[in-house]
Amino acid sequence: MFAGTTSPIYAAVQVASQLTQNKSISDAAKTSPTSANAKALEESNARTKAMTDAALAKFPDNVPLQVLGAASSGQLGDTKAAATRAQHAVEMGEAQLGTAGAGPGAAEKRQNLSNALTMHAAVAAQLGGKDAAMQDLARALKLDPNNEAALKISKLIQGHQFHDIPIKIPTTADPSKAMQMPDADVTAEMRAALIRQVVNRPEGFSASVGFTQRAETSLQLDDFQRMRDNATAALAKLPDNPKALMQRAFAALMLKDYQQAIIDATAGLKLRPDAASLLVTRATAYNATGRPREALGDAVAAVKSDPSMAYAWLQKGLAREKLAEGNDQYLGDIKVAADLDPALGPEYQEALARRAQGGKPTNDSQGTAAAGSPGFMGGLKDLASRIEPHHLYIFSAGLLGFTALILVFARRRED
């Protein structure tokens, strides 16, 4: 695809233009979910992946293209690939800046590394790593104090609403014209594209967040039916709100509607694949419906994602106990849970009693021995509150803004 190309800017412009086009097709498919639109999106996704892979194969050492590659992976829903490419871009940017010293090209390399760090922060925010994201953004702004992407994303992570960020919405820029524009104009257009992505939050966002806040109040009042109703209303306003999916899954779990809990947790995991709270919610539902093999897989993944989550260790141990795996290793898992959260101590005592009597936990009673204690309920409520509703959109703003933002730096690089 780029076999005869000698300039990375040409490849960057083509990838950026394809990302812009793919975003439009994706929006159309969400607005009007017809079979024709679904097919068009499938074909566009394939073109986007092929073009991105070809560009990175042709110019593997180009930092701006690596950042675009992370943007492409994120847009296609492959968060892990986005994280890998963003990390590679940061490492490459650090190496290139280290060799540049204070000589010619150092300023450009600082900007490249700043952009790579901002992309890395956007991915971290999507995965729930607020602290790591803020550390990346602090480094990015130290390298380039004018990095608007880093400024906007850091404000969003700190809890600012979109209307709290004073910015002027610019006119639409066409990335395909970047090669014919003076550098100053390209810079302005790139920043304009970034700001548009931050300002243009999804339709229904504010209303959806309002309903998730009501669901949170219902959670604290132990009104799980109303919690489910509010989460459902939030999803009606914004179907891909991961916070609302987590809330509805948890409410269903507490109402013993285990199949719905599995459905909603699965939908949430498509948006947040590594979210420990969603994984352990689904693991609990699997354990409660006699599916310990699936429960074990989710619980292991949840522990890997967040080793401090006591309830994940509990579900892991209960699943292993039912599967009769690892001799008494399941007891070790349940004891870890009790050590992390003393409210789960009764679960460990019940597991010891079952072992002495040669029994196994029943489906519907798994993980509920301590259910009457305030500490146990507090831990579960914390589990239901862990996902923030705006992470998905921070990620989108960070990724899509880069489809135009970094072209000015790519065009100056001819290696």
Image (spheres, helix red, strand yellow):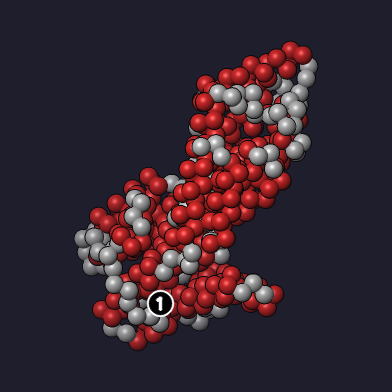
Q: Position of residue 148 (x, y in %)?
A: 30, 64
Q: Is residue 224 above or below residue 360?
A: below
Q: Visible in this render: residue 293?
A: no
| Residue drawn at x 27%, y 65% as measured from the top left | 166
Q: Position of residue 311 (x, y in %)?
A: 57, 32
* Residue receiving disc 1: 9
| Residue drawn at x 41%, y 80% as measured from the top left | 175
Which residue ends up furthest to the right in the rendered image?
Answer: 358
Q: Is residue 32 above or below residue 368?
A: below
Quarter of image, res 324:
top right
| Residue drawn at x 52%, y 21% as measured from the top left | 342
Image quadrant holding the N terminus, namely bottom right
Q: Categorize mark 1 by other alpha carbons within 10 Å: few (<14), some (14-19), many (20+).
A: many
Nearest the eye: 387 or 396 = 387
Q: Is residue 415 above or below residue 103?
A: below
Q: Is 101 positioned to the left or the right of 382 in the image?
A: left
- Check disc 1 and give the amino acid type: Ile
Q: Position of residue 130 (x, y in %)?
A: 40, 47
Q: Is 257 positioned to the left or the right of 15 in the image?
A: right
Q: Is residue 325 above or below residue 119?
A: above
Which residue ends up furthest to the left in the rendered image?
Answer: 102
Image quadrant holding the C terminus, namely bottom left
Q: Visible in this render: residue 296?
A: yes
Quarter of image, res 22:
bottom right
Q: Position of residue 334 (x, y in %)?
A: 62, 24
